[in-house]
Amino acid sequence: MVHLSSVGLAVAASGLLQTVTAAPQVTTDSASTASTTSFLGGLFDFLDVANLTVTHHNGKLYGCKCSPGQLCWPQQSKWNQLNNTVGGNLKLHIPPAASCYNTFTGPLGTVNTYDAAACADVHANWEDEMWNVEKPGAALWTYFTNETCRPTLNPTDSCTLGYYGVYVITATTRNHIKAGIDFARRNNIRLVIRNTGHDFIGRSTGAGSLIINTHSFQDVQWISSYAGPGSYSGPAVTIAAGVIVTGECPTVGVAGGFIQGGGHGPWTTLKGLSADNVLAFEAITASGHFVTANEAQNSDLFWALKGGGPSAFAVILSVTMKTFNDVSSAGATFYVNNTHIGFDNDAYWNATTIFHKWSNHFVDNGLYVYYELFPFTLRAQPFVAIGKTVAELNAIVAPMLAELTANGIPYEWNPKSFPTFFDLYIDLFEPEAAGGSALTGGWLFDHNDVATNNDGIIEAFKTVFSPRPDIFSFIVGHLFNPGYGAPVSNSATHPSWRNATDFVITVLPVPLGASKAVKADYQNVLTNTIDQALRDASGSGATYVNEADPYQPNWQGHFWGSEYPRLKQIRKKWDPLGVFYSIATPGTEDWEVIQDTRLCRKL
Ligand SMILES: Cc1cc2nc3c(=O)[nH]c(=O)nc-3n(C[C@H](O)[C@H](O)[C@H](O)COP(=O)(O)OP(=O)(O)OC[C@H]3O[C@@H](n4cnc5c(N)ncnc54)[C@H](O)[C@@H]3O)c2cc1C
Ligand SMILES: *[C@@H]1O[C@H](CO)[C@@H](O)[C@H](O)[C@H]1NC(C)=O
Ligand SMILES: *[C@@H]1O[C@H](CO)[C@@H](O)[C@H](O)[C@H]1NC(C)=O
Ligand SMILES: *[C@@H]1O[C@H](CO)[C@@H](O)[C@H](O)[C@H]1NC(C)=O
Ligand SMILES: *[C@@H]1O[C@H](CO)[C@@H](O)[C@H](O)[C@H]1NC(C)=O
Ligand SMILES: *[C@@H]1O[C@H](CO)[C@@H](O)[C@H](O)[C@H]1NC(C)=O
Ligand SMILES: *[C@@H]1O[C@H](CO)[C@@H](O)[C@H](O)[C@H]1NC(C)=O
């Protein structure tokens, strides 16, 4: 059944069929002509896409998504219609701490929100990851919400929307997700896909947006022998988009942003990135079509979804992945802190230099290590040796421990054996806190960097700790090498991952209430001092799209290297007009947020 609206017919008849390279259609601020029809085009027809709104800003011409308050913003009746389509699951999006304020004032008006019991719950759980994950639109890392509406003891403070979305669909069926995509496409509304809200760089928030929450998709189906296309016929699992498993952090969603960035975790040294282990996706395209993507069907989309960047090519409904038998494993914690070395800076950097010098050796022996560096604190928790005994793990780390001892540096090394990796995971990995205000950056050090420039890397770490006398930042590191167990990439991820050793995240806390000028200053320090120091100490040319600074120069090359041109082409094919958006993903170089809240394309 194909129903063509008069607008759709006119466009089709005049031969304006959108091709993959089509320029965006535009309309003016005053002429609100967004299509509301139920046009059902082909997989690559975007005939029902609403025109962008033309805006002049700083002497340049932009085509923007429609913002609340503009004439183009859909009438209430249209939102009601959408609400019916999604079974009443459309809600005005109100920030999670609004219950501590008398009122919430968003772009659509003011509502009373104070609720003492709910507010007590907010105060008790603000830093709890799971509590935040369950809120329909909450961002766990709050910096990119504009730090709006944090918990307060003063209900007369003002709670605003900040950079959060305006409406949220808590989707419970595939058709709810489709309805949201179709609505955004036909009405020129910014669209945000929100799974768990873990994103470090604000990609599950967005001013003026309609949010689709995919978190209720929790199906898990085990498959004893995969029968899809390709050579693999072993065990597999199909995970719906909202389900929570694995990663270093147990609350990151596998089938959302994690896999679309590549996904690293404790098994990565042995089995590659999570994306390398995908057999198939079920997804919904920007044109609103349900598709399967695997080696045989839509293979370009399949490849791009494996690490090509989140919310860029399609919305994932489920992912089918290879599974592996769990095995007995050894794990350990390793600490050098001021309990051991006092406030001896030389001893601290000696210990860190020695630890890091052995990082190639660790991953070359199949290990994964998660560690943190703060002043006078080297905290590696855990060392992970899947399928190995404590004796084997001890033998691998022995040269590092011997070198520390030879240098007179005390340390704590606590190895332990586990019947399964899962037992290790539960015992040794720690929960992380939500609600913090920070910018994050990061960089990949490969084997060559560690082999030839370990001292240079350590000097860069010193810059991270003290980029400027008034600013402090710290490091979260991950030792792994996808190329150890998966030497050849089948994913859209940067080729440099195949010789990885240490993926480092830099965390720069930003003071709450910072002015725009102060934020710009911190961003500048992150990009041009902290991460620049890491880049200068490395020849990898690579970093991780999910855990890096989206404002760095040449993010295209750093996230995807030689894969980028193909990714950009695939984006232009599957989402030529930008129904989806998340910052620094393929094809978004001509998009920008102007006037604080408007997502626009440079014309
Ligand atoms: C505490 C913590 C620990 C972490 N540990 C690891 C780790 O060990 N390894 C690792 O690789 N990464 C890790 N990450 C980073 C993680 O991969 C990213 O934050 C990732 O984006 C989370 O995806 P999500 O879907 O859970 O989050 P969300 O914030 O909900 O979404 C992130 C991005 O994915 C898009 N998205 C979500 N769902 C879908 C969907 N169904 N279809 C299309 N697009 C979608 C969103 O629009 C957004 O752009 C960690 C992050 C945190 C905060
Ligand atoms: C978009 O703009 C084009 C060119 O100005 C116009 O022909 C078309 O009708 C508009 N489409 C919609 C849906 O408003
Ligand atoms: C959507 O419908 C439900 C159920 O009728 C209602 O509770 C909710 O307020 C509606 N949402 C909006 C945004 O009007
Ligand atoms: C975001 O915060 C800045 C202050 O840092 C403020 O000037 C601006 O108005 C805020 N914007 C929104 C949409 O909250
Ligand atoms: C050093 O690490 C040990 C092991 O985690 C811990 O018990 C101790 O409190 C730490 N010391 C400091 C000063 O943080
Ligand atoms: C650290 O190492 C240097 C040489 O590399 C040495 O001179 C110094 O004594 C060491 N300091 C400590 C506290 O071990
Ligand atoms: C990885 O790095 C090592 C050390 O520099 C080098 O010898 C090796 O050739 C590299 N391997 C790949 C696949 O690039």
Image (cartoon, grey):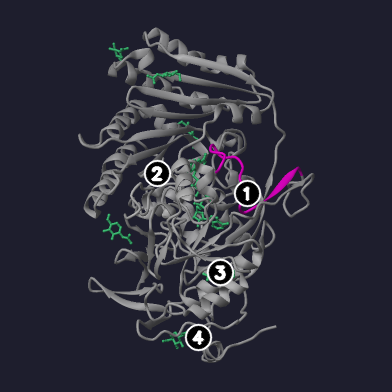
Say which quadrant the N terminus sits in: bottom right
Q: Badge 1, how many Cα within 10 Å: few under 14, some, many 20+?
A: many
Left or right of 204? Residue 352 is left
Q: Which residue is mark 3?
A: 180
> Which residue is painted at 51% across and 83% down in the image?
35
Above or below, 320 against 575 in this view is above
The three-letter amino acid code for the residue at tag 4 is: Leu
The three-letter amino acid code for the residue at tag 1 is: Val
Nearest to N terminus: mark 3 or mark 1:
3
Q: Badge 2, how many Cα within 10 Å: few under 14, some, many 20+?
A: many
Decide if ligand 1 comes within 8 Å of the CB at mark 3: no
The three-letter amino acid code for the residue at tag 3 is: Gly
Q: Which residue is mark 4?
A: 16
Nearest to N terminus: mark 1 or mark 4:
4
The magenta region covers 234-251
Disc on res. 243? 1
What percent of the width, then of the height, locates residue 566?
50, 59
